[in-house]
Amino acid sequence: MIYWELLLGFTRAGILGYGGGPASIPLFYKEAVERYKWVSHEEFGDIVALGNTLPGPIVTKTAGYIGYRVAGLLGCLAAVAATVIPTVLLMVLLLGYLYQIQDASWVKGMTTAIQPVIGVMMFVLAYSFFKDSWKSQGRLLTLLLVAVSLVVLQIFGWHPAILIGALLLYGLIGGGKKPEDEKKEEESTL
């Protein structure tokens, strides 16, 4: 039953993920966190963050990890296959036709109409991660990290992987803890 759920959930998210990997993340979230409860909200955020630091498409890494976590190696294979195969089949079957109609006004209209929806889905997920950071890191650190991220990505033009890697390193060496968290750790070791 779990393999069927993995196939169904990731096929649905993968095939409806118009706009590529980042646009699919909110759909993956809906399936993995809300519908099937394979991972928690916090775990999903960690999976996406770590997946962004590794090479390759984010959707296959996310599906593979969640599938493995839920049902081992066969779960990983089922989740990745469900993410990749339907899209590949549609591309192979429809590529010639899509190439012929790519300039049609109704195709451009569909593309234009879906963009705000994708933006809203990504915003909702980003806002959810922001709220979690606000609670766990505190207001000042969250706002500081948002400001630094905006500056290095938009003004300096850094690649996002460099920023993600730097922040993972920062978190690894103990950064990002609220003072009360450090105090609790000290008390627990005494």
Image (cartoon, helix red, strand yellow):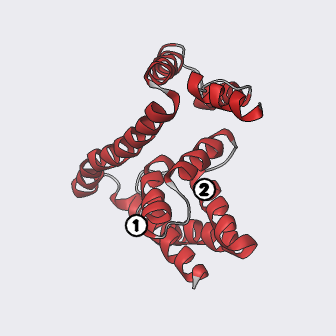
Q: At which x and y percent is residue 3?
A: 60, 80
Q: Residue at x 57, y 47 (%)?
A: 48
**Who is closer to the viewer here, 75 or 112?**
75
Q: Secondary structure at mark 2?
A: helix
Direction from residue 48 to residue 53 in the image, left or right: right
Does 166 appear above or below 55? above
Residue kind at label 1, given as amino acid type? Tyr
The N terminus lies in quadrant:
bottom right
Amino acid type indicated by mark 2: Thr
Q: Secondary structure at mark 1?
A: helix
Q: Which residue is mark 1?
A: 97
| Of the image marks 2 and 1, the number of the one nearer the N terminus | 2
Mark nearer the viewer, 2 or 1: 2
Residue nearest the viewer, comparing 184 with 29: 184
Q: Is residue 34 left or right of residue 112?
A: right
Q: Could you give the CA–CA distance between mark 2 and mark 1, rounded to whole angstroms? A: 31 Å
Q: On the image, numbered disc 2 is attached to which residue? A: 62
Badge 1 crowding class, 10 Å Cα cut-off, few under 14, some 14 to 19, many 20 or more, is few
Could you tell me which residue is drawn at 66 percent across and 48 percent down? 56
Nearer the observer, 31 or 138: 138
Whether the residues at callouts 2 and 1 have beta carbons within 8 Å, the answer is: no
Residue most toward the bottom?
1
Q: Position of residue 178 (x, y in %)?
A: 56, 25
Q: Which one is nearer the viewer's eye here, 51 or 92?
A: 51
* Image quadrant where one finds the C terminus: top right
Is 181 located above or below residue 71 in the figure?
Answer: above
